Image (cartoon, grey):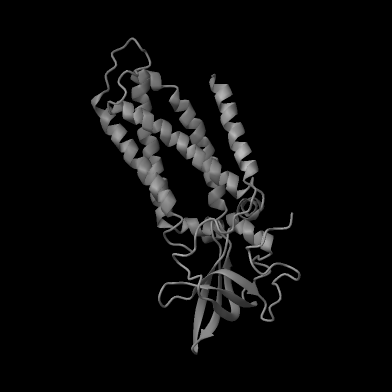
């Protein structure tokens, strides 16, 4: 495991991300990771709040176009996240809080797919605009899991450092 | 406004902000809660390791304090900042003798420093002709 992470960290790409003085290296990648997070969780929060009963004037089905946007932003964060990970692979792979972050992201993704199903089921805007019972539960789980993921990600800079 | 035009504006604004923000920031936040700027610590000894990492790198070295061997932890800047300074795992290999003068950690019983001047024992830069602190602006 340490061999693999040490190798990753030593690659030219990882060294460039970590050490290059260019603004396009670490600073830009970290910024994109934050922007992507804002889009994924922001769009997710809109859906969650609607399912929880806020903004009832907006039909649930009208939120469907948000999901491809979330998917693109998530792809951006997967890519930027991999780059940030390899730049500091030995350290990050040894941080327990990093695994909390990953697990909560996977769980939040699963919840998001289930939420998407509900929204797409309402895509026919002439159908009754009623949120099914599990919609509320999913929305709450989504909010909690994204909060855990964000907090765990932030704590990676503070727990078990250096 | 179409979604494409909106995306274009947002992207342009981000790139413009990134281009403007090329000023290197070494001290982007205060070190005062952890290190005492009114005091100075000095120690000398062999490097044990250099962790090049963002947002802050760390240099470790050993020295004798009151007859006891201790390991100092020197908090440095971002990895890119070290690259500019010329402090790398090649120039600060384990065993390299360094002289470090910096602000001591406030934590009782700890041996930490920040905002340090790192030189060879005779006061010369680690890299011949190089810099001894991170605070200087890089050559443009």
x then y, percent, for residue A89: 53, 55
Q: Residue at x 40, y 50 (%)?
A: A152
Q: Is residue A135 above or below residue B44?
A: above
Q: Residue furthest bottom?
A: B67
Q: Is residue B56 above or below residue A137?
A: below
Q: Residue furthest left?
A: A133
Residue A56 falls left or right of residue B115: left
Quadrant housing residue A146: top left
x then y, percent, for residue A137: 26, 33
x then y, percent, for residue B40: 54, 76
Query: Residue A103, can we see it?
Result: no
Q: Residue at x 43, y 62 (%)?
A: A160
Q: Residue at x 47, y 72 (%)?
A: B105
Q: Is residue A120 above or below residue A151?
A: above
Q: In terms of depth relative to the viewer, which is nearer, A104 or A153?
A: A153
Residue B40 falls left or right of residue A152: right
Quadrant housing residue A15: bottom right
Q: Residue furthest front?
A: B38
Q: Is residue B1 above or below residue A18?
A: above
């Amino acid at each position: 495991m340490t061999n693999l992470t040490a190798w990753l960290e030593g690659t030219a790409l990882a060294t460039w991300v970590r050490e290059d003085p260019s603004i396009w290296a670490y600073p830009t990648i970290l910024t994109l990771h934050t922007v992507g997070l804002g889009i994924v969780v922001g769009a997710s929060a809109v859906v969650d709040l609607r399912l929880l009963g806020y903004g009832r004037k907006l039909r649930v089905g009208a939120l469907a176009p948000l999901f491809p946007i979330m998917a693109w932003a998530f792809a951006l964060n997967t890519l930027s996240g991999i780059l940030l990970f390899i730049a500091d692979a030995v350290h990050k792979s040894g941080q327990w809080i990093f695994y909390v972050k990953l697990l909560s992201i996977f769980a939040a993704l699963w919840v998001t797919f289930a939420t998407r199903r509900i929204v797409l089921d309402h895509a026919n805007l002439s159908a009754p605009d009623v949120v099914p019972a599990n919609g509320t539960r999913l929305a709450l789980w989504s909010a909690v899991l994204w909060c855990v993921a964000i907090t765990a990600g932030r704590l990676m800079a503070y727990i078990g450092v250096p | 406004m179409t979604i494409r035009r909106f995306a274009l504006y947002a992207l342009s604004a981000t790139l413009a902000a990134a281009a403007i923000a090329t000023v290197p920031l070494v001290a982007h936040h205060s070190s005062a809660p952890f290190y005492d700027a009114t005091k100075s610590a000095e120690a000398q000894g062999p490097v044990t390791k250099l962790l090049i990492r963002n947002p802050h790198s760390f240099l470790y070295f050993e020295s004798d304090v009151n007859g006891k061997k201790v390991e100092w932890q020197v908090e440095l800047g971002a990895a890119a900042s070290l690259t500019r300074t010329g402090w790398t795992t090649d120039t600060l290999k384990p065993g390299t003798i360094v002289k470090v003068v910096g602000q001591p950690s406030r934590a009782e019983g700890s041996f930490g420093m920040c905002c340090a001047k790192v030189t060879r024992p005779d006061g010369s830069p680690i890299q011949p002709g190089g810099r001894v602190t991170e605070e200087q602006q890089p050559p443009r």
